[in-house]
Image (cartoon, rainbow, N blue to C red):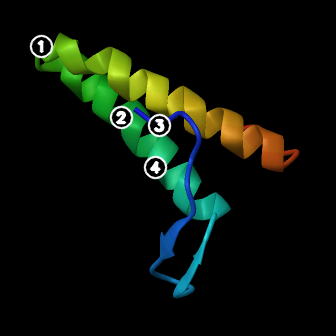
Amino acid sequence: MRLRPEPSFDLWEEVDSSSFFTSAVQHRALRQGSALASVIGQTSIISGYNAQADSILCFLQVGTSVQII
């Protein structure tokens, strides 16, 4: 499991880099996936989703002055 986000391909810009928007969407998707997993009883994956979301949040906060809630 990687804890440091790697650059990815941004479909909107067609460049290989780190995108604030893409990372923010990934963070939100992992948080919502964790909540859904809890509702449907898939508790074994919740900690992994939360750990990755925390890592992305840290990455976002280090690179900007914006705080994601």
Question: Three-letter amino acid code at disc 1?
Answer: Gly
Classify mark 2: helix, strand or loop: helix
Residue that carries the numbered disc 2 in the rendered image: 32
Whichever of labels 3 and 1 marks the residue nearer the N terminus, that label is 3
At which x and y percent is residue 9?
48, 74
Quick check: can you spot residue 69?
A: no
Looking at the image, do the residues carrying marks 3 and 1 touch, with CB atoms under 8 Å apart?
A: no
Looking at the image, do the residues carrying marks 2 and 3 touch, with CB atoms under 8 Å apart?
A: no
Q: CA distance from mark 1 to mark 4?
A: 22 Å
Q: Is residue 47 left or right of residue 61?
A: left
Residue name at image x 30 percent, y 34 percent: 33
Question: Three-letter amino acid code at disc 3?
Answer: Arg
Query: Residue most toward the bottom?
Result: 14
**Above or below for 57 versus 48:** below
Residue that carries the numbered disc 1 in the rendered image: 41
Classify mark 4: helix, strand or loop: helix
Q: CA distance from mark 4 to mark 2?
A: 10 Å
- Disc 4 crowd rating (10 Å Cα; few below 14, some 14-19, many 20+) is some
Question: Three-letter amino acid code at disc 4?
Answer: Gln
Quick check: can you spot residue 10?
A: yes
Whichever of labels 1 and 4 marks the residue nearer the N terminus, that label is 4
Whichever of labels 3 and 4 marks the residue nearer the N terminus, that label is 3
- Disc 1 crowd rating (10 Å Cα; few below 14, some 14-19, many 20+) is few
Q: Is residue 4 left or right of residue 28?
A: right
Residue that carries the numbered disc 4 in the rendered image: 26
Residue that carries the numbered disc 3 in the rendered image: 2
Q: CA distance from mark 2 to mark 3?
A: 20 Å
Q: Is residue 47 left or right of residue 64?
A: left
Q: CA distance from mark 3 to mark 4?
A: 15 Å
Whichever of labels 2 and 3 marks the residue nearer the N terminus, that label is 3
